[in-house]
Amino acid sequence: MRLTKTSDLWWKDAVVYCLDVETFQDGNGDGCGDFRGLTQRMDHFERLGVTCLWLMPFLPSPDRDDGYDITDHYSVDPRLGTLGDFVEFVRTARDRGMRVIADLVVNHTSDQHPWFRSARESRDSPYRDWYVWRDEPPADGPEGVVFPDEETSLWEYDEKTEQYYLHRFYKHQPDLDVANPAVRDEMARIMGFWLELGLSGFRVDAVPFFLETEGALDAPDLPDPHDYLVDLRAFMTRRAGDAVLLGEVNLPYEDTMEYFGAGVGDQLTMCFDFIGMQKMYLGLARGSAAPLVRALTERPQPPRDGHWATFVRNHDELTLDKLTDAERAEVFAAFGPAPQMQLYDRGLRRRLPPMLDGDQRRIRMVYSLLFSLPGTPVLFYGEEIGMGENLAVEGREAVRTPMQWEPGVGAGFSTADPSTFPAPPPAGTYGPSEVNVAAQRHDPDSLLSWIRLLIERYREHPELAWGEFTPHPTDDDALFAHTCTADGASITAVHNFGDHEATTTLPFPDGPYLDLLTRTPIPFADGELTVAPYGCLWFRHPA
C-alpha cells in the first residue's frame, strides 16, 4: 500500500499506548509520576514502536476516581507538573514522530469543581442548570448503578438547595447536563484549548452515558443526543482536520454503530471493540477460537474513515458484561476464581500474564492475535513487559500500579519512599525484581522484544489494519485463521487457542511460505498446516 494513502488516516494503522502520568515516571522524587519524568522516558516509546500516546486524566482533581473527577478543565494537576511541562512533553513526542491524545471527560465533574460548588449554593446560580436537578428522582429516569460496591442510587440529595442531583457514577461526580447549550459550548472550548496545545484528539469517556437523555423533564422536546456528538466531531475537525475521537462505547455491535454516525461517519472516529475482547477471553477459557470467530464475523464494517480499536485489556476492570451469565462464569473459573480477583460481578481486576499462569506461549499468542486483527491495537502500559496486578490494592486500581523500570524497591519509578507511591507495585513473581524493562530491553527472547517485533511487523504490513477481513473455516476449533487483503496483497495469520498441536487445511497453493514473525519456512504442503500448541504465525501470499 502507498504510504501517502495510509498516512492520511494515521489512526488506521497506529499503535496506541495508554498510560497514567502519575504512575509512569517520577521526575522530581516526590513519589508521584509527572510530565517531566514521562518526557524523559520518550526513548522507551520510540524503541517500542508506538505511534500514539493516550494520556489518562491529568487535570486538577481531588483524585477520588483516579483523576476522572475533574475540578479544572484548563490546567494540569500540580502534582503532575505545569502547562509548560505538558507542552514540552507533547513537543518531544512530536519530535519522535508520536501523536498524543487524552481523555475527554464530558459526562461529569468533581463535586469540588467551581461550577458545581456554585450550583449547589443556590437554585439561582448561573451554573445551576449545568447539572441535572430534580425535586424527586424520576420514576422513568436512568437506571443501573455503575459502581454497586459504593453506590446504591443514581441520585444524591443536596440539603442546602433541597433537590437531588444526578450522578451515574460516584456521588462525588455530579453529571453535567449536556443538553444545555452553555455546557456544549464550554466543552467545545475545552477541546479547542487542548488541540491548540498540541493534542491530536481525545479518548471520549463513557460515551453512552453523556448522550443519555432518559428521565429529562423535557426529553420529548430535546434534539437527538447524537447531534451533540456530530457537533463535537465537526468542531474538532475544523480546528484540527486529522484529529480523532476514540470512543468508549461498551454496547452490542448494532448499537455501537450509531456512535460512528449511522453509516455517515460524522461522530466517533474509532470505537473500542468490547464484544471482540470479551469473546476472546471466552475462547481462551475454552481453548477454542470459535467465540472470537463468531464475533468478528458478526462485527459490522465501520464507515469508510472509521475504525475499530482492539485491545487485550484497558485501565478499568476487564469487563465481561456482554457475556451470558454462564459464559462469564466460565471465564471467572478459568482466570479469576477467587472473589478478590473479580469486580462488580461483571469483570476481573487482573492483568493477562497472571491470568494465564505466566505461560509465555499463550501470552505471546494473544498479543500476536491483537496485532493481526483488523483494527487499531491499543496497549495498556506495562503490557509490553508482562506486568501483573496487585490484588492488595482496592478495586480497579489493582492494575494501575507504578511502571516497573528496574529491579529494586522503587522499581525505577521513583527514588521516594514507596509508601508515597500512588499504589504499591506487586510483590513476588510479578514484582519489579522479576519483571522490569531493564532486564528485558536487551534480551531477544523477552516479552518486550516480542511486542517490539509484533509492532514492527504490523507497521510493515498495513494490510492487517486496512485490509478486507476474511476468516477461514478450520478443521479444529482451536485454530483461528484469517486473511486481510488490500491493494492486491494478502496477509494470513493463524493462531492456536488450544494446548494441543492442531492441523487444518487452508485454501492456498503450496508455498514456500515464510513466517513473518520468525523468518522461518512454514511447513505447508497439500493445503495442510499444523500449528504448535498456542502457536501463531503470519505469512504473505498473493491475493
Image: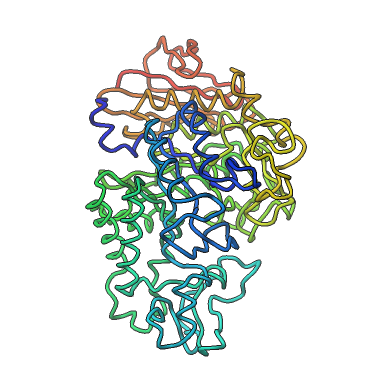
**What colouring does the structure picture have?**
rainbow
Up/down of 46 relative to 337, above or below: above
Q: Decide if residue 330 is in sight here.
A: no
**Residue 201, percent across and down?**
35, 48
Q: Quadrant of the N terminus?
A: top left
Q: Residue at x 55, y 66 (%)?
A: 146
Up/down of 314 relative to 482, above or below: below
Q: Decide if residue 334 is in sight here.
A: yes
Q: Residue at x 59, y 39 (%)?
A: 284
Number of marks drawn: 0
Of residues 278 and 476, the one nearer the viewer is 278
Q: Residue at x 25, y 36 (%)?
A: 8
Q: Quadrant of residue 342?
A: bottom right
Q: Quadrant of the C terminus?
A: top left
**Residue 34, percent across and down?**
55, 46
Up/down of 322 relative to 311, above or below: below
**Residue 242, percent across and down?**
27, 43
Of residues 90 and 499, the one nearer the viewer is 90
